[in-house]
Image (cartoon, rainbow, N blue to C red):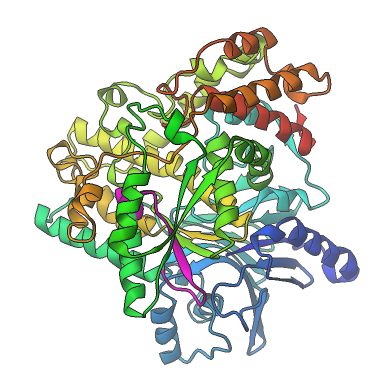
Amino acid sequence: MCGIAGFFNPYVDYMAEKPKWKGILEKMNRVQKRRGPDDEGTYLSSLCGLAHVRLEIIDLVTGQQPMVRKRQGRECVIVFNGEIYNMAELKAELLLEGADFQTASDTEVILEGYMLHGKDYIKKLNGIFAIALWDSAASELYLFRDRLGVKPLFYSMTGKTLVFASEIKGLLAYPDITPVIDKEGLCEIFALGPAKTYGKGVFKDVLEVLPGECITFDRTSCSKEFYWTLKSRPHEDSFAQTIEKTAWLVEDAVKKQMLSDIPISTFLSGGVDSSLVTAICARELKKQGKILNTFSFDFQNNDKYFKSNSFQPSQDRPYVEQMVDFAGTNHHFLECTNQNQLDCLYKTVDARDLPCMADVESSLLYFCSKVTDYNKVTLTGECADEIFGGYPWFHSQKAFQTNAFPWSDDMGPRQVLLSDSLIQELHMEEYAHAAYEKTIGETPVLPEDTPEEKRRREISYLNLRWFMVTLLDRMDRTSMYNGLEARVPLADYRIVEYVFNVPWHMKCPGGIVKGLLRHAGEGLLPKEVLWRRKSPYPKTYDPAYEKLLGQQLKEVLADSNAPVRTLLDKKKVDTFLNSSSDYGKPWYGQLMAGPQMLAYMLQVNYWLKKYHVQIL
């Protein structure tokens, strides 16, 4: 994985002040260096500048970027963040068409494919990617993002200049872009956060290339098109055929994503998703005489403080131990202390450039920092719940009857610490509802869908466009902050396309949560693991952690220079701190309850201060 950045303006000549613009490219690289600590490079021409930092995973010797190819007077240049999992097949096809390869990298496959076939070649890629490609002969710059938005790509227009980067901090390194938020940005933070509207970057005038989108910038215009969208189709396979095809897709996706020139690992929670990924990886490596490294995460003293609830019914460790014995992996139990996750609470803001999933994110960032002591590539079980219907709101009657995001359907808990004047000014309910309705209106449905099946599609589509992307952002930033490449094989677009159209009675046969995925995993896992009740990513239940958060928030509100003071009500905060926490009633998702509200407000304060955010 890597970080990319650059700029384009058809009305200037960057070569006239080459040292200045090279310096800006180098600065954009410097602020994103954690995404690619192994190498870096820049490219500058009269109209365009490109920058790249590299994490070496494939073609360690010759895969440097920006990659330049010249042919018959035509120069094309690419910077690429991601992995192309079907690169071997694509390269074989291109060789037959006369392509001349100088490296073993997937970057060159994309570039050669473009030079032979044009921008539509992007449709052939199976992978995760953010790409900027400059065609000097046409004076065109293309920005591409993978189908599901696994890899980030932000951009902004300042005058006639396009500026883009993998992370918002890369944009802010450009001299004319400043961190400003308006009422819309505040609504993104308080009404939707830690989610955000797809296509928006929260900061004023910061946008995001959408999943499956290609944006073309040339001398006179900017045009946008989707090379991929999710479509509804009739499902004609029998249940047995559906299980067989799902099993094949899952196994093929995992095997494809094992592509690496360095050793891989997996995250192993003991749940069905990560256990399936682990079982397939361990089996394939055993054929090569290798043992898979696996990692599980928990919190110090969680066996003492754990509180079972409807969202988190059981601890994971017994299932992890069973899977380690079953798959024969080299396992590492990683633990996080209260202080570890508090220390990382602000690092996650540095990584995301925004307030995020509080300690749900900070703990993952900490764990990723420990995984890199052993491996630089890992496969995870992320996204199965959004795709196969694993979350409680897929099964709740309330989600069918409430016209709101099912993981955040009550604005009350979000406003519990905010000042009354801010609440009145922002119109948070209206903002969230408009965002929700926009996605509902985009949901692909079939004319023959029953009202119930139509609503199931809507809930599924909401999860793919919002909740899953939030978790993908979390995984990308926490891993890349530590120079770790985290892959998500269950988010292979082929799986999404197929399973989206599988009717609910096959996805959830007999009311079994993720029953289709479990049936597809028959024979790969111990039955106790395959059929265990879902349990999400762990979090701490230690009351001492909440006390640490409360004390820090009190100190923040006592500081007259703390930017969050103008947004919160001190009396409301005091009342909140003196009330008992209810871990079973989250305000976002399954994990963000009372303590996470305190942590989120600490992140908001740090973000406003660290980024010198101007509030309009």
Residue 262 drawn in magenta:
yes
Quadrant of the image containing the N terminus? bottom right
The magenta segment = 258-274
Q: Position of residue 421 (x, y in %)?
A: 67, 10
Q: Position of residue 581 (x, y in %)?
A: 49, 17
Residue 159 drawn in magenta:
no
Q: Is residue 608 above or below residue 526?
A: above
Q: Position of residue 55 (x, y in %)?
A: 62, 68
Would you say 511 lies left or right of 600 here?
A: left
Residue 57 is at least partly visible in this image: yes
The quarter of the displayed image where residue 130 is located: bottom right
Q: Is residue 175 above or below residue 533?
A: below
Residue 238 is at least partly visible in this image: no
Residue at x 64%, y 21% (from the top left corner): 550
Give the total of numbered labels. Answer: 0
Which residue is nearer to you in this view: 29 or 199?
A: 29
Residue at x 34%, y 67% (from the top left corner): 282
Q: Position of residue 478 (x, y in %)?
A: 58, 50
The quarter of the displayed image where residue 504 is located: top left
Which residue is nearer to you in this view: 495 or 391?
A: 391
Residue at x 25%, y 49% (from the top left corner): 529
